Image (cartoon, coloured by chain):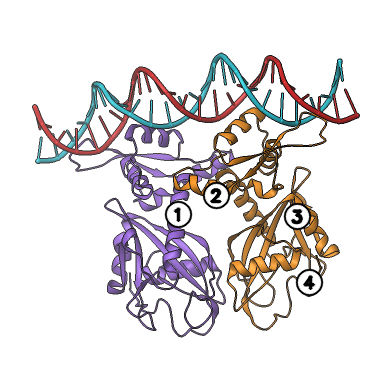
Chain colours: A orange, B purple, C red, D cyan
Amino acid sequence: MKAHRHTAHHLSEIPPGTIEAISIDCLIFGLNHGELKVLLAKHAEGISEGKWGLPGGWVQEDESLDTAAARLLKELTGLDNVFLEQLRAFGRVDRFPGTRVITVAYYALVNQEDYHVAAGFSASDVMWRNLEDAHGLIYDHDEIMDFGFDRLKHKLKHEPVGFNLLPEKFTLLQLQEVYEAILSVRLDKPNFRRKMMKMGLLIPCNEKQKNVAHRAAALYRFDPIVYEKLKDQGFVFEM
Amino acid sequence: MKAHRHTAHHLSEIPPGTIEAISIDCLIFGLNHGELKVLLAKHAEGISEGKWGLPGGWVQEDESLDTAAARLLKELTGLDNVFLEQLRAFGRVDRFPGTRVITVAYYALVNQEDYHVAAGFSASDVMWRNLEDAHGLIYDHDEIMDFGFDRLKHKLKHEPVGFNLLPEKFTLLQLQEVYEAILSVRLDKPNFRRKMMKMGLLIPCNEKQKNVAHRAAALYRFDPIVYEKLKDQGFVFEM
DNA sequence: GCAAAAGTGTTGGTTGTACACCCATGG
DNA sequence: CCATGGGTGTACAACCAACACTTTTGC
């Protein structure tokens, strides 16, 4: 993968062909060693030079908000085909210095295989940070982060999205750790496994872990097709 | 209440001092005779003259999105101090004819006391319509309505917002009917009452219904302070 | 007294929680 | 053979759905 440099994550000069009043900001969640992280970008210019914020950019005339968010995510981190969903628009009058800019915030969930790719992409001006240590960001990005984290917690309980933070094939304990990390709870292993399995969303890969110093766990993957089918029948995910 | 006329709910010419690319649309829910309604506005000019859509307008330079939404709601319907929350931004490229306009959608819950006020405010160019009959709106307003209705259903189950559709003081059966109307389910009266009462969110008014042809029901009101307090203690609303 | 809704009680099944226990694997 | 996590079984408590039943009010 070729790393273009996109130092200006929030431009002082707005490039031509972009909608002036609207920006996009991406709150990117990743998991590493059982800890929830967010990807931050360093500002290259302007009055907030050197400060950290969420990666973002401008919306082009010929692209939808969703498309713009996906494009920016790709440009700034190299990430593609990840879970990406709009949070909401943030529009305080004084949220952006100088001009009036409304931002549409998105959040993304990055799986552990892509985790290192994302971090290495733009090298020094992008970094993963523990959620608790990530405050003190530019503009209203602290607010966006808090809102997004609340949304993530809620989403995790009511929709099967935890998988997106794991590799394609994962064990039940890995999945449980996602819940424990994000919701800061301790869960009972046997009960978690039963509850999760009973929903029938996990497809067994008929494979086991290798080279582990204990009994190898079965690997599963999540099938969105099965989930859609169940949802149509009135099934509601709940953890 | 003095009724200014605001015929141009979606302007063809954008007034000066407003942010050009951004509009606000309000999805206003109301309850009447146990049926969920939405408030629609008729377009006065432009290519969509005579068609129905959600009431909306433009954001001013000196107001936040939330403020703009509240102002527009007041201007278009006379409603004030109602439940009002952002849904999300809608930004398809071709959603608006001519120029590129991104809209930030809000939804409001109107209590039954204000219901008639809202309908009468702008007389002929505003009307309440049953949700099922309300499709065929301009722009992407069908999509906004569907999204908003899903959000309402979800919200109702996970947060105490049903009260906003009722008068200040209401009976348990009225509240139950809110749930039945919106979620299209039939609920067991004794069980509903117990479940709701056990949460302790309803404050008895120590008053009863009057002039009803059956045993008068106790009246309750919802106390947001109590709810905030409980939430801080880890309580989660669930119906 | 009858209709209609308010409100209470009871019961049986389901679900969730806590925890004891055995199994496999590498060091 | 021990540490570590994988995985199964079970028993008690809490909860929920269904429905029988009594109460109050206007006509």
Estimate the spatial distance between the alpha carbons at disc 4 and disc 3, rounded to whole Å: 19 Å
The spot of residue A187 in percent (x, y) is 66, 32
Towards the viewer: A206 or A154: A206
Q: Residue A159: image x %, image y %?
A: 56, 46
Give SS at disc 4. loop
Per the model, the C-alpha gap separating discs 1 and 3 is 32 Å
Mark 2–mark 1 Cα distance, whole angstroms, equals 21 Å
A197, above or below B181, in the image: above
Q: Chain of mark 4?
A: A
The answer to which image quadrant residue A203 occupies is top right
Q: Earlier in the sequence, mark 4 or mark 3?
A: 4
According to the image, label 2 marks what residue? A225
The chain containing the residue under callout 2 comes to: A
**Residue occupying the point 54% across, 79% down:** B100
The residue type indicated by label 4 comes to His
Q: Amino acid at mark 1?
A: Asp
**Mark 1 belongs to which subunit?**
B
Residue at 44% over, 53% down: B152
Q: Residue B22: horizontal and vertical position, in percent?
A: 54, 75
Q: Amino acid at mark 3?
A: Asp
Task: Work out whether disc 4 and disc 3 sit on a shared chain.
Answer: yes
Do the residues at pointers 2 and 4 share their chain?
Answer: yes
Q: Which mark is residue B150?
A: 1
Answer with left or right where residue B188 lies relative to residue B195: left
Sequence-first tag of 2 and 4: 4
| Label 2 in the same subunit as label 3 | yes
Kindly report the distance in space between the C-alpha atoms of the residues bearing marks 4 and 1: 38 Å
Same subunit: marks 4 and 1? no
Which residue carries the number 4 mark?
A6
Which is more foreground, mark 2 or mark 4? 2
